[in-house]
Amino acid sequence: MKVAIIGCGFIGRKRAISLPKSMELSVVCDLNEVVGRKLAEDFNCRFEKKWQHVVDDPEIQAVFITTTNNFLTPIGEASILKGKHVLIEKPGARNPEELQKLINAHQKRPVVVRFGFNHRYHPSLLKVKKLVDSMDFGPVMFIRAKYGHGARLGYGDEWRFDPEIAGGGELLDQGSHLIDLTNYLIGEMDQVTGITGKLFWSEKLEDSGFIVLKNKKGQLAQLSVTCVEWKNIFEFEIMCKTAKIQINGLGRSYGRETITLYKMKPEMGPPDVEEIDFDQEDTSWQLENEEFYQAIQNKDYSDKKLKEAKYCIDTVFKIYQLNSK
């Protein structure tokens, strides 16, 4: 299967490194010729500067779209309408209206559509998903999560704080990951509230967001994201009826990836504690790419992932609307 990567930056390279053996990287594309040609040289493939040339290439069966947010929807929509399978990096669009264009295109030309929510494929999340679904500790009562990083010098002047390019700030960037993980574990939440803050980096878009969600079953989620976190952090806690499941870290600068199980005793009091350590390389990119390939092989043309991405971006923009008043 011949595939293309459009967007040759940090994430594009990660996708290239993590391709399944059954996917042949045939062409890469970027407006920055230096970056694009370097990736093409490293992976012995063709370079194109114009994404339209890639989408029009009849030999390309699947496209990984790893650009800035302003190009995600135009390239995704054109690729779908040309019959290409697509993996579009999160959030998939700058706003709900753009995401709807992808849904409309898919209705006209069913193909495999995936979005780059690679956190689902971290070993800790895969393990926690099994624990939650097993109901061994009863139903989930609430989720509490923190995700933050400290960025770098000049971060406020980068594209992530340009409304025309990014569409939204930290709530759309890292917030969409936490909203997606909550949906992955307990489903959609219909009650949404939250607060955003422009605390440090820029007056254009928020660098911090605080979210509270609730569903019809009464389950709650309290989520916070920020790039004003001077020590990178990822904490994800799931409170079940008889246990607390806590994920810490994502590897590298976020710290060692672990799960700690706090299992309540019948008589309550201090819980039994069990720790599971995932001392290994981050395989989430490989697993997500492999799932994309298998979906193509199985002709999984459902709109499930489009609906999930739409739910995430709709949730973010409900909070934006609340904070615009």
Image (cartoon, rainbow, N blue to C red):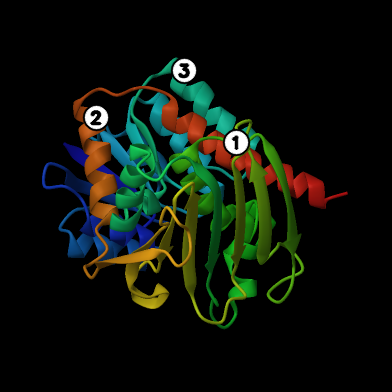
**Residue tagged by mark 2?**
296
Q: Amino acid at mark 1?
A: Glu
Which residue is at a point 47% across and 31% down the rendered structure image?
306
Q: Are marks 2 and 3 in contact (CB under 8 Å)?
A: no
- State which tag comes first along the sequence, 3 or 1: 1
Q: CA distance from mark 3 to mark 1?
A: 15 Å
- Secondary structure at numbered mark 2: helix
Between 120 and 59, which is closer to the camera in this rendering?
A: 120
Q: Residue furthest front?
A: 267
Q: Is residue 33 visible?
A: no
Q: Residue 185, relative to residue 145: is it above or below?
A: above
Q: Nearer the viewer, mark 2 or mark 1?
A: 2
**Residue tagged by mark 1?**
98
Q: Residue 292, relative to residue 250: is it above or below?
A: above
| Image coords of residue 74 (percent x, y) | 51, 38
Q: Are marks 2 and 1 in contact (CB under 8 Å)?
A: no
**Residue tagged by mark 3?**
107
Which residue is at a point 47% across and 17% down the rendered structure image?
107
Q: CA distance from mark 2 to mark 3?
A: 17 Å
Which residue is at a point 44% across and 42% down the rendered structure image?
185
